[in-house]
Image (cartoon, helix red, strand yellow):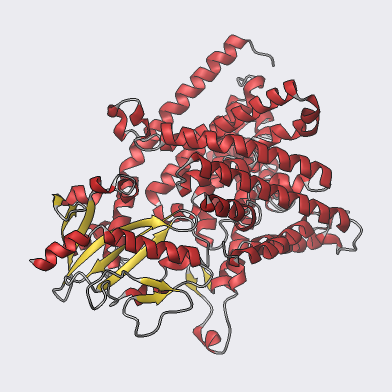
Amino acid sequence: MSDSNTKAEKEPMFSAKVLKLLKNPLNLENPITVQVLGICSALAVTVQMKPAIVMALSVTIVTAFSNLIISSLRNTIPSRIRIIVQLVVVAALVIIVDQLLKAYVYDVSKKLSVFVGLIITNCILMGRLEAYAMGNKPWPSFVDGIGNGLGYGLILVLVAFFRELLGSGKIYGMKVIPQALYDSGYMDNGLMILPPMALITIGIIIWVQRSKTTELQED
Amino acid sequence: MENLFNLFVRSIFIDNMIFAYFLGMCSFLAVSKTVKTSVGLGIAVTFVLLVTAPVNWLVDTYLLKPGALIWLSEDFADLDLSYLSFMIFIAVIAAIVQLVEMVVEKFSPSLYNALGIFLPLIAVNCAILGVALFVQERDYHSIAEVTVYAGGSGIGWFLAIASLAAIREKITYSNIPKPLRGLGISFIITGLMAIAFMSFMGIKI
Amino acid sequence: MEHSNKYIFIYSVIMVVVVAVSLTIVAVQLKPAQEDNIRIEKMQNILASVNISTAEVQKKQVIDVYNKYIVSAEAVNIKGDVVESDQAKVFAIDMGSEIKKPIEDQRLPLFKATLDNGDIALIIPLRGKGLWGPVWGYISLKTDYNTVVGTIFDHKAETPGLGAEINQDWFTAPFKGKTLFSENGTFTSIQIVKGGAADDDPHGVDAISGGTITSKGVEKMIYDNLLSYQEYFKKMNNQ
């Protein structure tokens, strides 16, 4: 009995509405391919999967917590300095993430270099803060942040997957293309590790996504 | 001098903010639908970069770097404030953009009408913060280097956004597969342009 | 909701204080771990320059490996006199800031390693300019102060696929066994030859095609840095 009671109480925490917040950004409202937010820092870290995953996690954490903080403070923030308060919260979180990366995953943090700092100007953050956190309760905002961070991460990891596989024959740093294939004349595509292919890969991902979800097509 | 010229050319063509680092893509894709607006935004970005990058460099060199405060007192030789740099950079950028907006509004209303709507957008343009962070990361030694790099990056960005806008204006008349229209094709065009720009890499300067 | 100026002011002050305090706490807490990372990376680089790979070694054990091989360190000045012999202090010398000092005031670090075969190698840190930013590395010499044992280079921002290749094995491996002095004893350093060095060239290695400026930067870095040690080499050779 008590079990079902607690379940009933917890129900609203993961209600259909909240779940939608988590699911929608993965496809229908994907921050990168649909909302066109946060591309800046997205692409430069997609040569290999490892930095891409770390970057995706960092962005998810920063988005979730800045949404949470701003949403909890939303009734106290003076509207005139709204943007500055948001920037300060975001910048503070990014600094913390950067410091943590430097302390615990030093080699990855070197690869990410300035792009961790650029999370601050990642439009996803300000976009979600303005559009969602300023007008909603902390918990849904937090979930919205996680959802958008993951939607962003999904594209990032997808792009990195193709670039690493085709560009250096590896997945997450491990060789997957057998040596026999190289011996018979296969070569890694050097173009894939250069910047332009990130753009084209994303273009193709958008193409595939919009062929499947026709309501996203533009005229 | 020769060095500065090299830096200038390289920052425009080879280390192009958009084609090599994808910085400022958000506004790049949003605004690059017509040539006129993108020219306005390009000029505004170049202008703001030219002001903010040297200021941020000064702040970094004389306030934030490890031991930077030594000019105040010998006691500060070990002080390292560089963990604050993100926060300070973004604050400086936001403040300067605000200042530029006010100054331009006061002294040149016509320029304000042309650039005004873009200025608030620029504070959160990744290219601006990106240049500030690249300058810090690459350890440029003089304010001349920083200014030249900032100017070159701005012009490179301007060039990229204006040329993409020109292509996009034409492309509205083309028969593109439906799912690829709009965003998809813009990405692919940008990618192709980036490949074209890569040919500058082999240039000997 | 409209707020009074006083409210806004107090709000911003509280915000700034809270943020500043929390960031400072985080920064101070994590500083030791971050500095450890930087120290360990430096140790790995020094070891790599005498061809000891620590890629498989746990982070914590790098220090043990380092202490096993690197037996002493000292810093000399341009005249070849030893100015610092405390190993920890020599290790802490930051080449980036050292190189900006006037040449007479520079402390020139060198590390001595005892290799597995009993040979002693001399490791000299290098610092110079590439195309886009600083390049640095280590070069190790045999005790004839002439033959190169190994090198390692790294860079901050060279062009990926071109200049950035200086940290790859194919670029550094040919340095092994090259000599710094010509037969009549003049200092020639190592040339990085565009289009490929001749197989029997004792002083030349292949350049990176497309990475000309970075290659030149590395060449100049080796020349400039080793030039400062000439007096020291002479002294040691005369002993």
Relative image position of residue B10 (x, y in whole percent): 59, 55
Q: Tell me if residue A148 can be seen.
A: no
Q: Nearer the viewer, residue C183 or A62?
A: C183
Left or right, C105 with reference to B205 = left
In the rendered image, residue A199, in percent from the top left (x then y), is placed at 68, 60
Residue placed furthest toward the bottom: A184
Who's the residue at 60% across and 75% down the image?
A189
Whether residue A120 is visible, yes or no, is yes
Which quadrant is the C terminus of chain A positioned in?
Answer: bottom right
Q: Is residue B165 above or below residue A171?
A: above
At 79% across and 62% down in the image, what residue appears?
Answer: A212
> In which quarter of the view is residue A89 placed?
top right
Placement of the N terminus of chain A among the 4 image quadrants: top right
Vertical comparison of A61 with C230: above or below: above
**Residue C104 position (above or below residue A185):** above
> Residue B108: percent from the left, percent from the top?
76, 25
Q: Residue furthest left?
A: C239
Q: Nearer the viewer, residue B145 or B58?
A: B145
Task: Kindly identify the residue that appears in the image at 30 percent across and 35 percent down.
Answer: B78
How many numbered dots are placed on residues in this image? 0
Q: Horizontal placement of C73 versus C160: left or right?
A: left
As rendered, which of A200 and B16 lies closer to the eye?
B16
Q: Residue furthest right?
A: B173
Q: Position of residue B45 (x, y in %)?
A: 68, 40
